[in-house]
Image (cartoon, grey):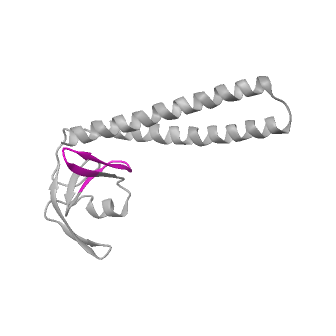
């Protein structure tokens, strides 16, 4: 199951990268077309707005590329008895994929949350084994499965 989850998340992030690239390309094209047909303050304001939007998209694009690079470092065939980066962990009724923070997905009827190893919950889990229990946000948690 971990392999399917990893592949799904890789595809999700790759799709985001493709969308951001298309949007940046479209903005660049719009800016070039606008530059040929306009002049004056309104033109400068429009170009400025397009430039700001392009900067935001470039930031999102670089973030997504970094996420994909991180996902590519995970070996889904690796098994471990302790929670580490790349682990699939069942904690109470939660299934967590310790990787990068990404939206929840449903694979084979199981809801999976991708969380960063730096997240507060992950920090409680890292280096612990099946059977470990801990209190987090006034709730008792129990690790019942690690893949």
Q: Main secondary structure of the magenta part?
A: strand
Residue most extreme to the right: 40
Q: Is residue 32 left or right of residue 24?
A: right
Which contiguous range is marked in magenta? 95-112
120 with respect to 108 (left or right): right
Left or right, residue 79 beside residue 23 = left
Q: Residue 131, located in which quarter of the rendered image?
A: bottom left
Does the rendering let one see residue 104? yes
Residue positioned most to the bottom: 138
Picture layout, residue 62 above or below residue 145: above
Q: Position of residue 60 (x, y in %)?
A: 52, 42
All told, the count of numbered labels is 0
Q: Which x, y percent locates residue 47?
A: 74, 36
Quadrant location, the N terminus: top left
* Residue 97 falls inside the magenta stretch: yes
Viewer can see residue 76: no
* Along the line of sight, the residue nearer the viewer: 4 or 47: 47
Residue placed at 79% from the left, 24% from the top? 37
Query: Is residue 117 depicted above or below 23 in this figure?
Result: below
Q: Which residue corresponds to the image point at 49% horizontal and 42% vertical from the top-left? A: 63
Q: Is residue 69 above or below residue 28?
A: below
Residue 14 drawn in magenta: no
**Residue under the point 46% across and 40% down:** 64
Q: Find residue 88 and report its horizontal and vertical position in percent.
A: 22, 50
């Amino acid at each position: 199951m971990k392999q399917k989850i990893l592949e799904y998340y890789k595809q999700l992030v790759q799709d985001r990268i493709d969308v951001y690239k298309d949007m940046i390309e479209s903005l660049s094209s719009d800016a070039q077309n606008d530059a040929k047909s306009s002049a004056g303050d309104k033109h400068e304001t429009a170009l400025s707005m397009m430039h700001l939007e392009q900067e935001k998209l470039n930031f999102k694009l670089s973030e997504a590329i970094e996420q994909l690079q991180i996902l590519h470092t995970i070996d889904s065939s690796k098994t471990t008895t302790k929670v580490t980066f790349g682990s699939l962990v069942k904690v109470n009724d939660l299934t967590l994929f310790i990787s990068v923070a990404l939206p929840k997905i449903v694979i084979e009827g199981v809801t999976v949350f991708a969380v960063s190893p730096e997240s507060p919950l992950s920090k409680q889990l890292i280096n612990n084994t099946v059977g470990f229990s801990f209190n987090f946000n006034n709730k008792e948690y129990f690790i019942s499965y690690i893949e």
